[in-house]
Image (tube, rainbow, N blue to C red):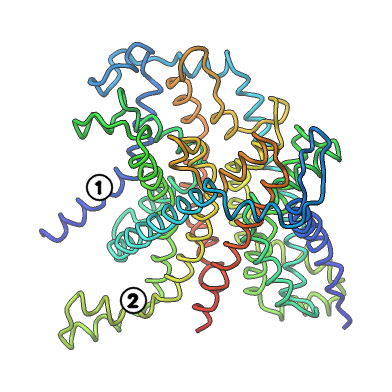
Amino acid sequence: MKERGRIYVLPAIIILSLVTIYPLVYVFYLSLHRNMPIFGISKFVALKNYMFLLKDERFWNALKNTIYFTGISVMAELLLGLMIAIFLNRPFRGKGIVRAIVLIPWAIPTVVSAKMWEWIYNPDFGILNYILRENINWLGSPFWAINAAIFMDVWKTTPFAVLLFMAGLKLIPRELYQAAKVDGASDIQIFINITLPLLKPIVLVVLLFRTLDAFRVFDAIYVLTGGGPGNSTETLSIYAYKTLFQTLQFGYGSALSVVVFLCIGIISLFYVRMLLK
Amino acid sequence: MIKKAGFYLFLFLLISYCLGPIFWQLITSLKPDIELTKIPPILPQHPTVVHYISVFKRHPFLKIIRNSLVVASFTTIFSLAVGSLSAFALAKLKLKGKMLILGFALSVSIFPPISTVSPLYIIIRGLGLRDTIWALIITYTTFSLPLSIWMLTNFFKQIPDELYLAARIDGCSPFQAFYKILLPLCAPGISATAILVFIFSWNEFLFALTFTSTTASRTIPIAIALFPGIHEIPWGEIAAATIIVIIPLIVLVIAFQRRIVEGLTAGAIKG
């Protein structure tokens, strides 16, 4: 039987090449130019945009913010997700409905959750200050704003980690736990010596997905704070977006976009190597 | 006994944590304007639906919802059509470089949207598609393809090769075997994939923000992010709009909870 598989994959490959690979080459090309499309300006400047980037304090600030946001939120999501998953890893009535409820923050649009939290953080009429009996300007102070954004992100994305961990925990045979209990292992010993090693691949997968997602964060912070106050919550994606579509510097904005792409590439390679080990 | 009580306390805390912010939004949406700028009380003293009415009367929200529905539906259909063809070839046919194709799809799925938004903007403007829903449908179809291909390949692989071969021996062409045998057998997998693609396009923000500029093509996330207020931020209307958008998602999640979880975890654990 002659089976020709090629024509079946052709549409996907054509679409992916045209709408992702071609733009990727194009963005690199743009980044080598001084380009302002509305004025019809386009001039080849070689690596000048990248040279400028190295001295651009706003870029380093955005990189710092991105790393801080990614590091803290991914760690928090991982620990919280693992904790919740372990708690839920037992049969109980209404497990399906609890799983559905945990999924809800994940399913609602990021923009919607950002607007929701903006109202919760409202300094005068927000419920957070009311509950805490505080009077903190959450989104108005550089220190609180970035952490408020992290807290919102943790609320929205922990469910994803919980679900993956629950699926991973289900694959660990119950006999292993029973045997360990019989041998007199404590809960903490069981966790460190059985659960964690067997869960390692899932932990890495969650880390990979969440790190990549957090590193390219845009909507959450763009809607919650717009990058402010000052530039205290401006991440790389937001800086690149503002450069592209607010100050209309397509060349420099594209150079920033290329840098985001390179960072993502490096992070993925790092994780993939860990996974293959 | 204490252990059990502790477990239910934990469950209660978990559920409040997940639903609390949404509940607060629901309460806000029912408060008349004067009560919005007062706390306490927490609960509305004179509950009202004015905000829900004005979302539709003072804003073109119905048109916006229609845009979102059209974009998400077309994206889901296109992404699944193209994705299932590839998945079929990858799971059941002879094909050189299968791993290469899957790897290619996977690497596309990690592309940060910001890295392609500037050239895509220029291309879309050049094609005259700016501020049309087609700009969004084309982009979303592409960026959801890797997910479709991976998930559907996994689901097709679960169907025994013998079934496919039997159909071929009975005289089906590969394509007939695909849509008469494999597709119906994979219905659960296809609906799981469809839900995830639908949610992705329903929620997407960056491309929609860049490619749209009027109500002709704006989708819900853009409308909510840019909700216009005359003097101050209309928190009541925003809250009402939020609740309107969240309800269908909650229904979808509760109805298809098992499918969604299967879809999310299948890719991550096997892949």
Q: Amino acid at mark 1?
A: Leu
* Residue A9 sits above or below residue A55 on the image: below
- Residue with the mark numbered 2: A196
**Percent of width and height locating residue A133:** 19, 30
Crowd around label 2: few <14 · some 14–19 · many ≥20 (10 Å): some
User: Which residue is pictured at 39% across the width and 44% down the height?
Assistant: A146
Look at the numbered disc 1 and give the secondary structure of its residue.
Answer: helix
Crowd around label 1: few <14 · some 14–19 · many ≥20 (10 Å): few
Image quadrant where residue A260 sits: bottom right
Circle on res. B78: none
Of B253 and B57, nearer the camera is B57
User: Which residue is pictured at 68% across the width and 62% down the height?
Assistant: B108
**Percent of width and height locating residue A231:** 47, 39
Residue B247 appearing in the image: no
Which of discs 2 and 1 lies nearer the camera? The answer is 2
Residue B221 left/right relative to A126? right
Look at the numbered disc 2 and give the secondary structure of its residue.
Answer: helix
Q: Amino acid at mark 2?
A: Leu
